[in-house]
Image (tube, grey):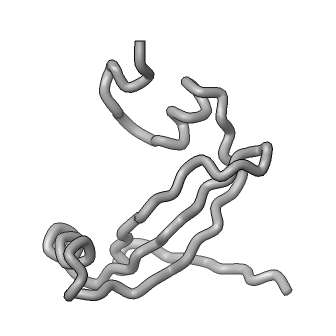
C-alpha cells in the first residue's frame, strides 16, 4: 500500500519521519510579503485574512538531501518569528 492510503492527518514532517524514515534536520526559509495580484497570495488573503507573510521553505534531511519544499502562509497577528543570521 501507499503511505497516503489512510489519508493525510497532522504533520507532514512527522509522516516523513515515522512512515518513511526521513528525519528533517533543518529548513532554509525565505520570508516574503504577499502580493494581492498573485492568485495563490490572493486566495491565502481571503482565507486567512490580513496580515500574512509567506514562508518558502526547503526542508533538508539528516543526509543533506532536499526532501520537501513548502509554501506556508502565516498570520502575523498570531505568531512571532525570531531570526538568527550567522555571518
Query: In the displayed structure, does residue 41 sit left or right of residue 66?
Result: left
Look at the picture and state if 49 lies above or below 63.
below
Question: Which residue shows up at 20% across the image and 87% down it?
Answer: 37
Look at the picture and state if 70 lies above or below 68.
below
List x then y, in percent, for residue 41.
Answer: 26, 76
Question: Which residue shows up at 32% across the image and 20% down it?
Answer: 6
List x then y, in percent, for residue 85.
Answer: 75, 83
Image quadrant where one finds the C terminus: bottom right
Query: In the displayed structure, does residue 10 sit left or right of residue 13?
Result: left
Q: Residue furthest left?
A: 46
Q: Residue furthest right?
A: 87
Question: Which residue shows up at 51% across the image and 80% down it?
Answer: 31
Query: In the displayed structure, does residue 75 sit left or right of residue 47?
Result: right
Image quadrant where one finds the N terminus: top left
Look at the picture and state if 14 lies above or below 47.
above
Q: Residue furthest top?
A: 1
Look at the picture and state if 41 lies above or below 87.
above
List x then y, in percent, for residue 79.
Answer: 43, 73
Question: Which residue shows up at 41% across the image and 64% down it?
Answer: 71
Query: In the displayed structure, does residue 69 sit left or right of residue 73?
Result: right
Along the viewing direction, whichever of 56 and 50 lies nearer the viewer: 56
Q: Quadrant of residue 75?
A: bottom left
Amino acid at each position: 500500500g501507499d503511505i497516503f492510503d489512510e489519508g493525510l492527518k497532522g504533520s507532514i514532517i512527522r509522516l516523513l519521519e515515522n512512515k518513511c524514515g526521513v528525519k528533517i534536520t533543518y529548513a532554509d526559509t525565505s520570508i516574503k510579503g504577499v502580493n494581492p495580484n498573485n492568485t495563490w497570495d490572493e486566495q491565502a488573503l481571503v482565507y486567512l485574512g490580513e496580515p500574512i507573510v509567506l514562508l518558502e521553505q526547503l526542508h533538508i534531511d539528516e543526509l543533506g538531501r532536499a526532501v520537501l519544499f513548502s509554501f506556508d502562509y502565516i498570520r502575523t497577528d498570531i505568531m512571532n518569528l525570531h531570526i538568527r543570521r550567522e555571518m
